[in-house]
Image (tube, rainbow, N blue to C red):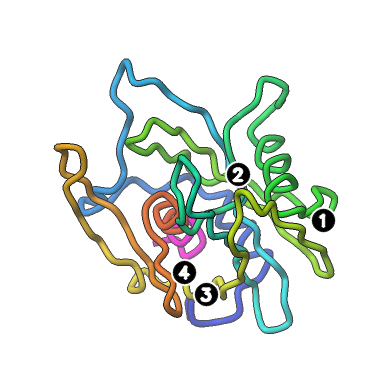
Amino acid sequence: MTPASSTITLDQIRAGLQRPPPPPEEHDLHMISLREGTKVTEAAVLVPLVNRPQGVQLLLTQRTAHLRDHAGQISFPGGRVEPDDPDRESTALRETEEEIGLARERIALLGRLPGYEIPSGFRIVPVVGWVEPPFELKPDDFEVANIFEAPLRHFLDPANYQRREYHFRGRHRHYLAIPYEGRYIWGATAGMLYSLCRLITGK
């Protein structure tokens, strides 16, 4: 029985995050490396895992439609690295507190996922955090349109991921998508979730 079909535990998540990142598969065309000379924006996000009686839930946000970067997309709380941030974990915790009001004292850091680069020049470090209820959220109305939870097990089933492609600014792009109950999770968020899936399931 795999974690995707059973109750996932904190110990399983910890063990998965200690594994070395699996090499990209032949069809993982969504994974890119920024070209030399690209103007890079360093960033970090928090992948919040909430311990609920019905099973571990993934906490996600939907960005407001007017933002300059990734408007309207479903994402993790996070953002650009600031000069005063000592490490990427600090960036993820600071941005999470600013965006959704989740206090860093409520978050136990479990580890990192492999870094993820996107064509717009962002180099993102995903930091996984464990959140024990109860906790309070205070979303930033300027940045966050909605906050919701979804069962982690949905994102641990490789069959739920879709490989898609499109043309953008004269280039052919590949990306992952993982729909959930009418919501369309795609791009970097889906790519980072797929990394989490492979680490935890060991596939």
Magenta residues span 196-203
At which x and y percent is residue 122? 44, 33
Residue at the image point whose x is 54% and y is 34% from the top: 43
Instruction: Check disc 1: other Cα within 10 Å, few if <14, some if 14-19, many if 20+.
Output: some
Q: Give the residue pinned by disc 2.
A: 78
At which x and y percent is residue 63? 53, 54
| Magenta span dominant secondary structure | helix
Q: Is disc 1 in contact with disc 2, using a CB cutoff of under 8 Å?
A: no
User: Which mark, by number, is residue 153?
Assistant: 3
Amino acid type indicated by mark 2: Gly
Q: Is disc 1 in contact with disc 4, using a CB cutoff of under 8 Å?
A: no
Q: Is disc 3 in contact with disc 4, using a CB cutoff of under 8 Å?
A: yes
Please tell me which of labels 1 and 4 falls first in the chain: 1
Amino acid type indicated by mark 4: Leu
Amino acid type indicated by mark 1: Arg
Number of numbered discs present? 4
User: Which mark, by number, is residue 156?
Assistant: 4
Q: Is disc 3 in contact with disc 2, using a CB cutoff of under 8 Å?
A: no
As rendered, which of 76 and 200 lies closer to the eye?
76
- Which of label 3 and label 1 is nearer to you? 1
Q: Give the residue pinned by disc 1.
A: 106
